[in-house]
């Protein structure tokens, strides 16, 4: 999530950024009004009648190398027949623009809308979950063969970022102890081409779209991708299924997802044994993100932001108890 001070809509900035992409002027105001802001500001627009998305973020909050690495990975996936978010080049031919605006420097890129229905808006039947699993397995299979020109950060780079955020916030010492233990445990695990590579990191039902016509899934939102154990994606997906699956059907969804995954990539006992550690990594990273988000609050907070802050603070406390409780 962006810092609280950057969680506001800015339609003028969106229009200025969109001037670098061909787009439909008719109905633009109505499309932009469907924006959302979280880890980026996302503004829908139409291009030749098709829905697309403009993604904006302050330069100060992002790593340019990670964004370029994400776009390169997406190009590789699409070129190899994988259904993933498809970047739209700007009029200049570049897929990433660094704009100098009166609101500050901003990264801008645009994507085509993924086909199908978000998995969390389907019935999450075994057929849907098998397709979801196949998509994750195929992603990992392609990642094993990927040789990038622009390398994205690793799980250890991300932990360095976590360390800096915790130091800036004067986090409790027991959180630092948990972070050090997590880093040591990750470093002790042998890394091979089979168990470690570029993962999605956020492969959850709201980032995966199911196309009933092709019985396949497309994935979006690769911004958090990093070099990590492939088990991380599996742990994240299963945790999301536990929350999103219809009541009483989690085990059914879990088995169908893993069945689909095994059709495209191996799921070993070693990978399954890593799931608890991967969930712990997610908790530590999420904790640092919440701390970062709340580090700079605007002088005047609307009511919705005050409510958001209450929820974020409760989430931070929940994560902190979980992290400290798991530390030996």
Image (cartoon, helix red, strand yellow):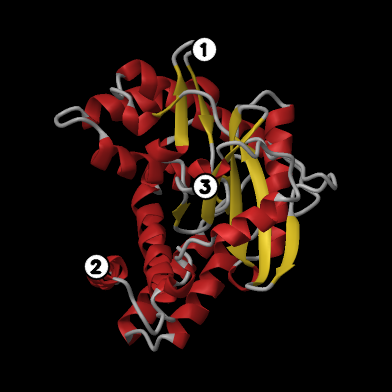
Residue under label 2, please give it.
307
Task: Check whether the beta carbons of the residues at disc 3 and disc 2 lie within 8 A of each other.
Answer: no
Q: Which residue is mark 3?
A: 32
Q: Secondary structure at mark 1?
A: loop
The residue lying at 25 percent from left, 33 percent from top is 245
Mark 1: few, some, or many residues within 10 Å (few <14, many ≥20)? few
Q: Which residue is drawn at the image coordinates 74% and 62% (left, top)?
A: 98
Disc 3 vs disc 2: which is toward the camera? 3
Q: Which mark is residue 67?
A: none
Q: Looking at the image, which is closer to me, 147 or 115?
A: 115
Q: Is residue 159 left or right of residue 100?
A: left
Q: Measure how far apart labels 1 and 3 are at the Cα level.
A: 30 Å
Badge 2 density bin: few <14, some 14–19, many ≥20, Cα 10 Å: few
Task: Give the percent coordinates (x, y) of residue 231.
Answer: 46, 44
Query: Which residue occupies 84% across, 44% down?
Result: 93
The residue beneath circle 1 is: 214
Classify residue 175 by image quadrant: bottom left
Q: Residue furthest front?
A: 26
Pick the residue in front: 111 or 184: 111
Judge from the rendering whether residue 154 lies leftward or rightward of residue 238; answer left or right: right
Residue 84: horizontal and vertical position, in percent?
60, 33
Q: Secondary structure at mark 3?
A: helix
- Upstream in the sequence, badge 3 or badge 2? 3
In the displayed image of the protein, which residue is found farthest to the top? 213
């Amino acid at each position: 999530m962006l810092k609280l001070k950057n969680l506001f809509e800015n339609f003028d900035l969106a229009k200025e950024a969109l001037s670098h992409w061909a787009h439909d002027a008719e109905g633009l105001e109505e499309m932009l009004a469907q924006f959302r802001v979280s880890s980026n500001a996302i503004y829908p627009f139409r291009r030749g009648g098709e829905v697309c998305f403009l993604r904006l973020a302050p330069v100060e909050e992002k790593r340019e190398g990670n964004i370029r690495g994400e776009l390169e990975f997406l190009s590789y996936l699409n070129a190899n027949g994988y259904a993933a978010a498809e970047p739209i080049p700007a009029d200049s031919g570049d897929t990433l623009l660094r704009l100098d605006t009166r609101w500050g420097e901003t990264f801008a890129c645009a994507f085509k809308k993924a086909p199908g229905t978000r998995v969390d808006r389907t019935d999450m039947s075994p057929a849907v979950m098998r397709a979801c699993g196949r998509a994750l397995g195929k992603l990992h299979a392609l990642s094993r063969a990927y040789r990038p020109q622009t390398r994205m950060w690793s799980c250890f780079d991300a932990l360095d970022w976590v360390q800096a955020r915790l130091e800036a916030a004067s986090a409790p010492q027991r959180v630092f102890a948990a972070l050090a233990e997590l880093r040591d445990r990750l470093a002790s695990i042998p890394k091979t081409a089979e168990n470690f590579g570029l993962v999605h990191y956020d492969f959850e039902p709201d980032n995966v779209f199911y196309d009933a016509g092709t019985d396949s899934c497309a994935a979006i939102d690769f911004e958090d991708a990093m070099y990590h154990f492939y088990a991380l994606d599996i742990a994240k997906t299963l945790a999301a299924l536990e929350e999103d699956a219809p009541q009483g059907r989690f085990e059914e969804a879990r088995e169908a997802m893993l069945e689909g995954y095994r059709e495209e990539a191996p799921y070993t006992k070693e990978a399954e044994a890593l799931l608890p550690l991967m969930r712990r990594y997610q908790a530590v990273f999420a904790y640092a993100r919440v701390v970062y988000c709340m580090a700079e609050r605007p002088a005047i907070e609307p009511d919705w932001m005050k409510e958001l802050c209450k929820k974020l603070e409760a989430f931070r406390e929940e994560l902190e108890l979980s992290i400290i409780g798991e530390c030996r």
